[in-house]
């Protein structure tokens, strides 16, 4: 059986700091502190709405909802012992059609490498 390489090993991640840096770069009239406040306020607003059980819909991007998970009996993967898992509320994101289509577009460099068999 051939070994497969991890798919996400070379994938870069975007942090909150990266979002703030991008905001400052695109809108130099805002200070870094102003951009940080704006980004934090957006995330706080989203979290507060979810905490209240509200649905968040961002057209062209996706929607966030809170799903309820029932209490269940689980298993500790380290010991194999059964454990009771309490009911909980968890955030769930459903991607929008426009974002799904934009993500599915292959960048030019990747398309060329795929076509040449690399």
Image (tube, rainbow, N blue to C red):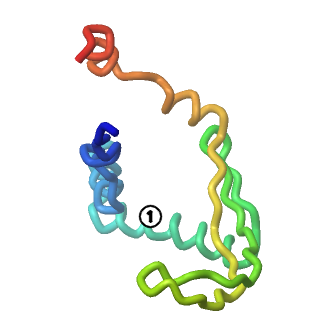
Say above or below: 48 vs 2: below
Say above or below: 7 vs 106: below
Residue at the (54%, 73%) spot, across then down: 44
**Depth order, front residue of 10/5:** 5
Residue at the (66%, 34%) spot, across then down: 97
Question: Is residue 28 visible in the rendered structure shown here?
Answer: no
Q: Position of residue 19 (x, y in %)?
A: 35, 54
Query: Which residue in the rendered view is the most extreme toward the front?
Result: 1
Q: In this image, 24 relative to 90: left or right? A: left
Residue at the (65%, 40%) spot, across then down: 96
**Depth order, front residue of 89/43:** 89
Quarter of the image that includes the N terminus: top left
Q: In this image, 35 relative to 84: left or right? A: left
Quarter of the image that includes the C terminus: top left
**Depth order, front residue of 52/32:** 52
Local secondary structure at mark 1: helix
Q: In this image, 22 relative to 99: left or right? A: left
How many numbered circles does the render carry? 1
Residue at the (30%, 37%) spot, across then down: 2
Identify the image quadrant of residue 56.
bottom right
Question: Is residue 19 visible in the rendered structure shown here?
Answer: yes
Identify the residue position indicated by label 1 in the image. 38
Q: Position of residue 109 (x, y in %)?
A: 27, 19
Identify the image quadrant of residue 73.
bottom right
Say above or below: 110 vs 31: above
Q: Position of residue 25 (x, y in %)?
A: 26, 46
Query: Which residue in the rendered view is the most extreme toward the top?
Result: 116
CA neighbours of label 1 inside 10 A, class few (<14), some (14 to 19), many (20+) = some
Q: Position of residue 22 (x, y in %)?
A: 31, 48
Say above or below: 65 vs 113: below
């Amino acid at each position: 059986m051939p070994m497969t390489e991890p798919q996400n090993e070379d994938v870069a991640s975007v942090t909150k700091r990266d979002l703030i840096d991008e905001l400052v770069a695109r809108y130099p009239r805002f200070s870094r502190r102003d951009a940080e406040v704006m980004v934090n306020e957006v995330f706080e607003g989203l979290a507060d709405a979810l905490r209240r059980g509200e649905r968040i819909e961002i057209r062209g991007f996706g929607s966030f909802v809170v799903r309820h998970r029932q209490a269940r009996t689980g298993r500790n993967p380290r010991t194999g012992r059964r454990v009771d898992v309490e009911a909980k509320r968890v955030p769930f994101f459903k991607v929008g059609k426009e974002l799904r289509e934009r993500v599915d577009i292959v960048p030019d460099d990747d398309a060329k490498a795929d076509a040449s068999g690399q």
